[in-house]
Each structure stands twice: as structure tokens, then as C-alpha cells.
Image: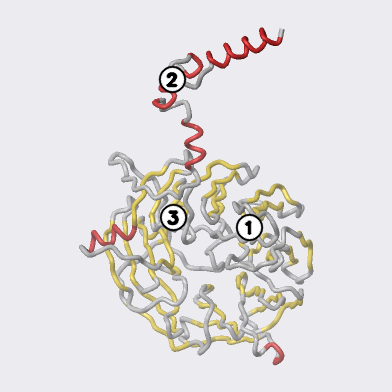
Amino acid sequence: MKFIFALIVLIFVQNCSFDNKTGIWENENKIKKSDNLFKDFETLTSSNKIFDTIIPIKKEFKFKISKPINNFKWHDIFYDETNNLKNFKYNDLNQLIYKSKKVTKHNINDSVLFDNNHVITSDNKGNIIVFSINQNKILVKFNFYKKKYKKIKKQLNLIVKNNIIYVSDNIGFLYAYNYKFNKIIWAKDYKIPFRSNLKIADNKLITSNQNNGLYLIDVQTGDLLKLIPTEETTVKNEFINNLSLNKNSVIFLNTYGSLYSIDNTKMYIKWFLNLNQSTDINPSSLFLGSQVIAHEDTIVVSSNKFTYIIDANTGSLIFKKNFSSKIKPIIIKNYLFLITKKNLLISMNLDNGKIIYSYNVNQLIAKFLNTKKKEIDLLNIMLVNNNIYIFLKNAYLLKLNIRGQVLDVKKLPNKINTYPIVIDGSLLFFNKKNKIIIVN
């Protein structure tokens, strides 16, 4: 019986020999040559490779974008509640039409607000500076802090509405200051440093602290309406919590890499999604990303390696792209424009996730100037007069048409020390000497 069993096993092994002639591997060569069998597998495994492909725009493609608007205010450091920019009007003469005196001797914030012809900024001494363009002078220089905080470098987060500047800081204070009457409306000490931009939705001031706690504050009294704790990180990285508003929802991206949608009226979590791709899933794992942009029913956010297109209503992932935005992208109509960490200027259709074009910015500049390719240091990207404006930290401005073709490379009259804003057809920013510069 044992002999018969051994014979059967021997015959079976011989017939199943690992050579190319046996029937079990008859499709081996076909499998190797097949383009379709492992197509989905290849797509999944290659998605982790950072995108660096040049894709020229199709000649027949035509953009449909909104008309440029003449803008007169900048109440939020990211322009509006969604963090997205518009297509702005700009006179584009590149002429210096205004230069103020030095507004402070201290390091200023890198963001500028503009309200009723007043430029609003702050410095690391905790001064809130309101400069009147019409009167050509500092209207107010207000400091909230007592002497015991004198040696602490302050990082103030500002937003303005109805002549009231709302402020959070890296000490734990939150206060409302009426700059017209030079008066504190209310002030609260929440003890834990704040670490996010500010948003105002209905009667709520919204902010976050360094422990990733989300605060919903009564905008009139400063009283806490609700504190929503989220994942805390023990190691503080460069990424700063970011807030955006989408219809009746607060969109919150914390330093752990989790994206939350909170109902602004009922103040409960609608959904959340973790975007942290780190394999070390513990509270100390670091997350880096860019600011959240909300656009209609879509949310766009970049993490360390990927860009996510997310349904704002459900939190479901629509598209995940293997490139990351180097600076805050912009959305015009259904088109996304961004510059990746590989310095690729990408335009993408948000409806279908297809890349319209992808160009290396360094190569575009080198070709236009007929020079060798060099690395650029990016500051900001805007859509102006239907064209793409890329601001560099060395005061150069790249002007490209909407199709990604370089139209001009020019130097601004002064070096930029803050993010530029567009007001009444002009560029406004602070220069390296802390003077207000307006370029027509």
C-alpha cells in the first residue's frame, strides 16, 4: 500500500515539474507579455513614485475661467473663508506708485490684511500696526502685552471684520481689538499656545491650539462655545494647523495629518479622514502639508507626498495624486493650479482628475531667458488678468499665460518681505525694510 502511494506521489511530482514545457505554466510567456493582466497592480504600486512627468497641453484644449475681479479688501490672511484666491485684476505696469515710511523696526508677520484703505500687520514684539494709506501714517500701534511677556517673541494670528481685529497668539491669549476706537472688546487667556489661522463663521471665531484642540468661540464675548479635541502630537513640526470654511462646515487639518469636517451650527464632527502616510502611527509621527482649499463641494489638500481631492459633504476620497504642492494652490472654476516639490507647474481638471499640462518651471525660465537651468525659490502663486503669476523670494515675478507658456520674467521695484496681495489693480506688500510698497 505504501509502495502504491509513493508511486502515485512520484508520478504527480514528475508531471508537475517546474519547466517551461508543462501545462501548468503554459501561459507563463503570455503572462510576461501581457499589458493588461497586472495593469491595476502596476498602477497601485507605482502610485508611491513621485510624479515628475512633463505633459504638454493639447492644442485643442481651451480653458473656461471666470473674469478678473477688481479687489478692494483682504480681511483674511488667505484672502477669504475658503483659503482660495480669485482671478484678480492688475494694471501690470510694474511701476512703484507708493512707498511708506518704516512701520516697525522689529520682524513683521509674513501676512498682510487690508481693510478700508488701512494696511494691517503685526510684529514679533506683539504690536498690531494699522497704517492709513490715505493719511500716509501709522494710525494705531497697539500692544496688548504686559512687561512679563516682553522678552517672548510673539506670533500673532489675525483676522479682521467690522473694524475689529481678532487675535490669537503663541502664548495662549485670544482677544478682540477695535482699531477704530483703539479699544479691547474682550480678552481671554486659554493658557495653551494657539497654532492656526483664524476663521469667522456666523457668530463664531474658530481657532486651534498646539495640542490640536479646535475652539469655537463666541465672537462677541470670547466665551468658549465648544472645544473639540483631536489627535495630539508630542513633537511640534513646521506644519501649522489649518482652517477653511465650506458652506456650513469648518474644515480642520491638524498637525497629526487628520482632516475634520465640523458642522458649524450644531458643532459636531461630520466626518474625518487621516492623510498621514507615515508607517509610524504614533502621536509623535510628523506630518507636513499645505493649506486646505475649499471649492464648492470639493476640498483640496496636499500632504508630504500626495495631493488629495475630497468630497466636502461625505469626506470620501475622489482622487489621490502622487505629487505634493510646494505652495498653496489655487482653484479657478474646476481647474486646479499648483507647483509641486519637483517644481512642476501642474494644471488639473477637478471634474475628472486628468492633468491638463505639467511643465518644469525651471526649464520654462531657462528656455525663455536662454540660460542654464537653475533652481528657484518660490513664494506665492496667483491668477491675475487670466494669467498665472509666480512670485519668487528674490523679487522676481514670472508671468505665464493660462496654458503654462512664459510671457515675461521681470523684477519688482522692491524685494518682497510678505505675501503680496492685490488691491484695486495694484500689488501691495512689505519690503525688507518694513516699508509698505504698492506697485501699479
Asked if one can make out residue 205 in the rendered structure from this viewpoint, the answer is no
Q: Residues within 10 Å of mark 3 (few under 14, many from 20)?
A: many
In the figure, residue 210 lies in which quadrant? bottom right
* Left or right, 394 with reference to 190: left
- Seen in the picture, residue 17 relative to 224 is either above or below; the reply is above
Quadrant position of the C terminus in the picture: bottom left
* Residue found at x 61% / y 46%: 312
Which residue carries the number 2 mark? 20
- Helix, strand or loop for disc 1: strand
Q: How far across and down, in percent of the image, does residue 291 sit?
A: 55, 60
User: What's the CA distance linking mark 1 and mark 3?
Assistant: 19 Å
Which residue carries the number 1 mark? 253
Q: How far across and down, in percent of the image, does residue 316 sit?
A: 62, 42
Residue placed most toward the observer, 223 or 110: 110
Q: Residues within 10 Å of mark 1 (few under 14, many from 20)?
A: many
In the figure, residue 230 lies in which quadrant? bottom right
Residue placed most toward the observer, 418 or 323: 323
Which amino acid is tagged 3? Leu
> Residue furthest toward the bottom?
147
* Residue found at x 75% / y 66%: 218
Asked if one can make out residue 348 in the rendered structure from this viewpoint, the answer is yes
Q: Residues within 10 Å of mark 2 (few under 14, many from 20)?
A: few
In the figure, residue 174 lies in which quadrant? bottom right
User: What's the CA distance linking mark 1 and mark 2?
Assistant: 55 Å
Which residue carries the number 3 mark? 338
Q: Earlier in the sequence, mark 2 or mark 3?
A: 2
